[in-house]
Image (spheres, grey):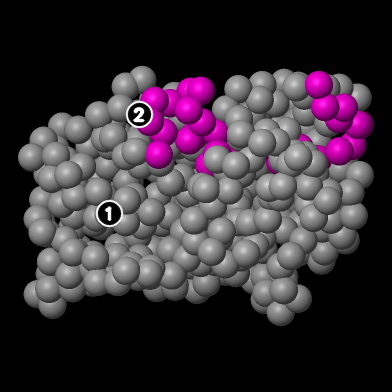
Amino acid sequence: MVTTQYNPFIPEIHANPYPMYVRLREEDPVHWSALMEAWILTRYADIVAVLTDSRFSANRRQAQNRFAQEAQKIAEEFGPFGRTQTMLTSDPPLHTRLRRLVSKAFTPRMVEGLRPRIQLIVDELLDAVRDSGRMDLIRDLAYPLPVIVIAEMLGIPPQERDQFKRWSDEIAATLGGPFTPPEVLERARKSAIELADYFRGVIAERRREPAEDLISGLIAAEEQGQILSEDEMLATAMLLLVAGNETTTNLIGNGTLALLRNPDQLRRLQDDPSLIPAAVEELLRYDGPVQGTGRVAMEELEIDGRPVKTGQVVFCVLGSANRDPAQFENPDELDITRQPNEHIAFGDGIHSCLGAPLARAEGQIAFETLLRRFPNPRLETDNPQWGGSFILRGLKSLPISF
């Protein structure tokens, strides 16, 4: 008899969903959730199969459940970001065209070129707290770092970053989906409209005077005949801001917490900084910033003998896949030397995260610099506060002393 229900909204499960994932993998790995009106997948093999299968669409508008229909109504009020398909919510050939245009800015070579600038930003942020002997890791490092980087890539002046971050956070807060409170939706709607208006101004300015930034790159691509409509350009810029922002904050925050709770691994990393790249991969696997992603079945099919109807939503719990013992030995242990480590924290298939090289670079530099400059970090709370939604997993704050 299956007793476990997928319910990520209970506070203690929101704080630690992993025991629920264990029960689901063992009892009901292809789980129909009446609450979510969706199939919930928790095993690595099932999730990789769905994410790499063209019979499943990333376009949530195709979904037949009430939440998707409700979300569509709400999205219409979010301006270009709500009404325009992006890389995240489209299938080929549209997805292929959009991704090809944007991917030029995120090649490993481009990201390598950003490393000195990322290092400088991290050093400046740590300089600001060095003398006080304590910091809130989220507020002082994990939160500002990615927004400064993406704002500079988009060509946003420093004095407008705070406003920019507020817009981004308020839009990201709606990723709780159908259970988002009305007042949060209303703030996000206003932010989405304001952010689109702001980007319209930037686009007009870059048409007159191109610069070395992402927006100018999108305009240049458009002028070479690979047409991006104004709405596509706005929605793409907004997606890059929102997607590139909170996820990296969560990588740095969740990763620091995991290291502080596993002091043997923390010491090992400090003793051998060459382990930083492998450690970042393990931190992504162990407590990833994105816990799940949805797809829509485009035809009737079966997953492990369970009948999935056309239009039904399949929710892939990435956080559970990354702790699946069928894929990872001792999956609930943090092991910064883990090899191989084929985690899917960045998704899989054609929609795997375009910004992964940038997130990795920011994470590597943040952890290396933090542990080198503040060699004895200590957690100042036993109960850190989790914010975010059940999809974006991250801490509201993480007070540490050093």
The residue lying toward the viewer, choosing from 369 and 164, is: 369
Location of residue 383 (image quadrant): bottom left
How dense is the environment of label 1, judged by Cα within 10 Å: few (below 14), some, or many (20 and up)?
some
Location of residue 331 (image quadrant): top left
Q: Quadrant of the C terminus?
A: bottom left
Assign a secondary structure to mark 1.
Answer: loop
Q: Is residue 106 above or below residue 365?
A: above
Tell me the residue at 72%/47% (across/down): 3
For residue 308: magenta? yes
Tell me the residue at 15%/52% (across/down): 371
Assign a secondary structure to mark 2.
Answer: helix
40 on left or right of 68: left
How dense is the environment of label 2, judged by Cα within 10 Å: few (below 14), some, or many (20 and up)?
few
Image coordinates of residue 269 in percent, x first then y, are: 16, 40
Give the labeled residue for mark 1.
Answer: 261
In the image, the segment drawn in magenta is 305-332
Give the labeled residue for mark 2.
Answer: 109
The residue lying toward the viewer, choosing from 362 and 95, is: 362
Q: Quadrant of the N terminus?
A: top right
Q: Amino acid at mark 1?
A: Arg
Image coordinates of residue 222 in percent, x first then y, are: 65, 37
Q: Earlier in the sequence, mark 1 or mark 2?
A: 2
Image coordinates of residue 128 in percent, x first then y, are: 18, 71
Image coordinates of residue 93 in percent, x first then y, are: 76, 25
Q: CA distance from mark 1 to mark 2?
A: 34 Å
The residue lying toward the viewer, choosing from 330 and 290, is: 330
For this orientation, the residue located farthest to the front is 1
Marks 1, 2: nearer the viewer: 1
